[in-house]
């Protein structure tokens, strides 16, 4: 405090005291102002101008205090002690902030290095960001991110910490990020969390958190990743978390985020919160059901997150052909939405794999890494095989009692062999899950089952194939008989079909449609087999010709599926092969209209006209299948506009209504049927810039309370999308509000919009347009580029021309004329080798 008094004296004096002359003048100044004397020699001692110093007397201190306008030294002490303490606290807080940031970045970089990802390539996990942001803005004090192993918890939290520390998002708050293995090395279970953090972060033996004034208007953000990795037996994990729960319930201005694997959280850690009354209400989004072994509060990766990973890990290295999420079929997209599976996909990716669209390759690699070639592999295989055998390899899907498993292997004994560790790993990575249920005798019983259905299916298929010594036609019959009462039959058949197709096993598949109707008439099996044809294997045409010999096969195909997404890349080859074998009006419309639309999209004008001429000879009536009716209606639109026939265009709505009547007659829910029919039609009207007729079709059911008759959120979303796309003034889309843009962006990222490329293209265009209107050029180009890439890779050339022209138009609207002209020139080159009038049609 003396140094502070001297500093104030110098302020009053007007300059630093550095010479004998200064001391002489100051002595006189004190006498004149205070009426008392402090000698020149005393002043020289206090300012270290004499080699021998001494403590000042109370007389000296009182006069110096009066010189700076205080009554006495005691008055100076009383009025400056709080300020001095405050300054000390500020210094200590910023020292703690520096220590915490340095340590946190070290933890982050360790995780990034372990994952093999550069810091700039780690994606933002939107749910993690939203959860932490909501916690910091709320009255809650803690939250937990819970999910199976490999679910992206660690990298999501590390990414948040990295961005917020690097960009100095918080001026006063401290972020301290530490993972379980670091806690194991640093934490002494005999001390409290508050004392431990005071020592680790602030380098003091005092409890920093006990001073409420010290934490006023500041937040200490503690993020502990992987609580379950503190120790293998979970003893130290439980102790640490128990004290952490006490810490949260005791101190103010503390925010805590933790992560843990579901298997440990639901069986061990959550009980510490449930048993702590004062803390229980302070946890945001708490998973309170400790019995549910599959519980998780993290959603799968959304479309944008997957795309960001693909861009950073694959597309940045391979610029020849960019891979986008929409290239992946539904099964593969579903699989890679699990972060660990996406990591495996990136590590084994090849263009051939993408062509095959086979998620089994991912599951094979997963099995290799986490079971066959991992630690405790023998024990894991013992446990898995016991469960498979107990369930008769999928014929009975009832969970296995854990007690039965314990009777065979010591999965419950922590210090007795490797079975406990193997079992915990299988739980941690979501391969197995536990659930405690009440049996019929009112006793609680713990059951064990596979939580990864794709993995279970693969293991069963391997067993079936190995037992049969390979895949042959007879194996399908065996599966049909043995699994007749199992929900897995369809999945096993699909898996066997995919395996045989990938191996060009023609003999196993050529008579597939002679199998019982329980297989051949199943729509899921049909869809899976058609999607296999997207891979242009040597046996594709041979199989289609063989299947064309079966009336039931053609009827099933033309009434239950039309692969519009693959129309210009693989499905048109199938239609070309099937057309010579088409006998009924339904089969001919299905093939001819599909091929006509494909040729129009491929800018083949003459071929389009030739196929269209054959269509005029076929009568459309109630015998025509639903998919054929949809394709026929779409063809009507193409024909009217490509021929630019005013009479056809004028009668277009009437023609579509007539086709719609035949379509709707097939369904009990007439409203839903009409909605679904027109949702297939509308984007093609928009392709030819006819928003007026598209809007007219939308208005035909706009007065109906759609949520009462439609419970599918994707259908309701598509309706909302096309209403926005039809909402024009003078040929210009109405600008979306920020909230509408935000909602649309979340919808695109979370749902596949009826799994239709054309719907996604339309959604991307609308969102891109809205981003540009909000001056977000980066997002504008991101979404518009996605729309163009879908069109290019799926060979929607006519749609690509329309997109490029529209892109040029909206760029010109914002005075980017040079860029607009380059896109306009490129769109011209797409049609100049074909029918040039295509350019003016869209």
Image: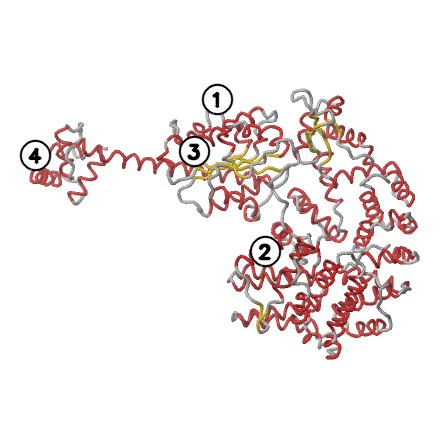
Between 430 and 632, the one nearer to me in the picture: 632
Which of pointers 3 and 1 lies earlier in the amino acid sequence? 1
Q: Secondary structure at mark 3?
A: helix
Can residue 792 be spotted in the picture? yes
| Disc 2: which residue | 745
Q: Residues within 10 Å of mark 1 (few under 14, many from 20)?
A: few
Q: CA distance from mark 2 to mark 4?
A: 77 Å
Which of pointers 2 and 3 lies earlier in the amino acid sequence? 3
Label pair 4/3, CB-CB below 8 angstroms: no
Which of pointers 2 and 4 lies earlier in the amino acid sequence? 4
Can residue 325 be spotted in the picture? no
Q: CA distance from mark 1 to mark 2?
A: 49 Å
Q: Position of residue 425 (x, y in %)?
A: 67, 31
Q: Position of residue 416 (x, y in %)?
A: 68, 20
Label pair 2/4, CB-CB below 8 angstroms: no
| Disc 4: which residue | 36
On the rendered structure, is 648 left or right of 42?
right
On the rendered structure, is 6 left or right of 463?
left
Which dot marks residue 190?
Answer: 1
| Disc 3: which residue | 201
Q: CA distance from mark 2 to mark 3?
A: 40 Å
Which of pointers 1 and 2 lies earlier in the amino acid sequence? 1
Q: Secondary structure at mark 4?
A: loop
């Amino acid at each position: 405090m003396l140094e502070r008094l001297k500093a104030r004296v110098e302020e009053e004096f007007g300059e630093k005291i550095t010479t004998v002359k200064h001391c002489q003048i100051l002595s006189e100044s004190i006498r004149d102002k205070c009426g008392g004397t402090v000698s020149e020699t005393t002043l020289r001692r206090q300012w270290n101008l004499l080699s021998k110093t001494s403590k000042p007397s109370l007389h000296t201190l009182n006069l110096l205090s009066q010189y700076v306008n205080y009554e006495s030294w005691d008055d100076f002490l009383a009025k400056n002690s709080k300020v001095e303490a405050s300054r000390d606290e500020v210094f200590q807080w910023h020292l703690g902030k520096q220590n915490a940031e340095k340590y946190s970045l070290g933890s982050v970089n360790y995780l990034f290095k372990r994952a093999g990802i550069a810091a700039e390539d780690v994606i933002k996990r939107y749910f993690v960001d939203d959860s932490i942001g909501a916690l910091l803005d709320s009255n809650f004090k803690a939250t937990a991110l819970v999910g199976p192993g490999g679910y992206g918890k660690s990298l999501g939290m590390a990414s948040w910490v990295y961005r917020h520390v690097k960009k100095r998002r918080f001026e006063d708050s401290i972020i301290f990020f530490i993972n379980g293995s670091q806690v194991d090395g640093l934490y002494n279970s005999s001390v409290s969390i508050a004392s431990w953090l005071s020592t680790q972060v602030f380098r003091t033996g005092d409890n920093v958190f006990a001073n409420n004034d010290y934490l006023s208007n500041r937040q200490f953000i503690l993020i502990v990743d992987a609580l379950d990795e503190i120790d293998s037996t979970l003893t130290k994990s439980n102790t640490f978390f128990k004290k952490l729960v006490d810490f949260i319930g005791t101190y103010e201005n503390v925010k805590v985020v933790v992560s843990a694997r579901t298997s440990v959280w639901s069986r061990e850690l959550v009980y510490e919160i449930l048993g702590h009354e004062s803390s229980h209400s302070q946890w945001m989004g708490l998973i309170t059901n400790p019995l549910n072994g599959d519980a998780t509060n993290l959603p799968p990766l959304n479309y944008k997150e997957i795309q960001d990973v693909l861009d950073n890990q694959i597309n940045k290295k391979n610029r020849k052909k960019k891979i986008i999420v929409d290239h992946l079929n539904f099964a593969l997209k579903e699989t890679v939405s699990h972060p660990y599976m996406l990591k495996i996909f990136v590590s084994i990716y090849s263009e051939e794999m993408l062509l095959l669209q086979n998620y089994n390759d991912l599951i094979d690699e997963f099995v290799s890494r986490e079971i066959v070639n991992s630690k405790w592999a023998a024990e894991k295989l013992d446990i898995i095989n016991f469960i498979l055998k107990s369930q008769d390899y999928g014929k009975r899907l009832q969970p296995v009692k854990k007690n039965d498993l314990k009777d065979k292997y010591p999965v419950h004994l922590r210090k007795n062999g490797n079975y406990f560790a193997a079992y915990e790993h299988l739980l941690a990575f979501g391969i197995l899950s536990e659930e405690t249920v009440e049996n019929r005798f009112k006793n609680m019983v713990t059951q064990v089952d596979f939580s990864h259905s794709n993995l279970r299916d693969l293991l069963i298929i391997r067993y079936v194939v190995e037992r049969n010594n390979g895949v042959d036609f007879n194996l399908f019959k065996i599966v049909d008989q043995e699994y007749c009462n199992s929900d897995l039959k369809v999945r096993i058949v699909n898996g066997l079909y995919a395996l045989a197709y990938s191996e060009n096993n023609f003999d196993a598949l050529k008579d597939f449609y002679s199998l019982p109707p329980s297989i051949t008439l199943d729509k899921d099996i049909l869809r899976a087999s058609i999607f296999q044809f997207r891979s242009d294997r040597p046996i594709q045409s041979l199989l289609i010709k063989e299947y064309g010999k079966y009336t039931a096969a053609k009827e099933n195909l033309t009434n239950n599926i039309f692969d519009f997404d693959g129309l210009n890349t693989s499905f048109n080859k199938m239609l070309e092969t099937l057309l010579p074998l088409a006998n009924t009006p339904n089969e001919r419309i299905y093939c001819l209209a599909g091929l006509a639309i494909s040729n129009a999209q491929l800018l083949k004008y003459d071929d389009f006209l030739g196929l269209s001429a054959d269509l005029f000879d076929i009568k459309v009536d109630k015998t025509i299948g639903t998919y054929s009716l949809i394709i026929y209606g779409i063809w009507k639109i193409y024909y009217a506009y490509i021929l630019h026939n005013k009479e056809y265009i004028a009668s277009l709505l009437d023609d579509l209504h007539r086709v719609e009547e035949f379509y709707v007659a097939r369904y009990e829910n007439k409203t839903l049927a009409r909605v679904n029919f027109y949702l297939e039609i509308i984007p093609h009207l928009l392709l030819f810039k006819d928003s007026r007729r598209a809007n007219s079709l939308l208005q035909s059911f706009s007065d109906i309370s759609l949520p009462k008759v439609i419970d599918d959120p994707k259908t309701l979303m598509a309706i909302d999308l096309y209403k926005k796309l039809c909402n024009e003034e003078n040929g210009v889309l109405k600008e979306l509000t920020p909230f509408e843009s935000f909602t649309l962006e979340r919808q695109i990222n979370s749902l596949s919009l009826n799994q239709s490329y054309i719907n996604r293209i339309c959604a991307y265009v609308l969102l891109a347009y809205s981003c540009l209107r909000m001056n977000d050029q980066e997002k504008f180009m991101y979404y518009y580029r996605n729309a163009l890439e879908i069109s290019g890779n799926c060979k929607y050339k006519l749609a690509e021309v329309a997109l490029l022209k529209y892109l040029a138009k909206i760029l010109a609207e914002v005075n980017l004329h040079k860029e607009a002209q380059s896109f306009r020139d490129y769109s011209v080159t797409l049609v100049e080798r074909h029918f040039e009038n295509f350019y003016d049609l869209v």
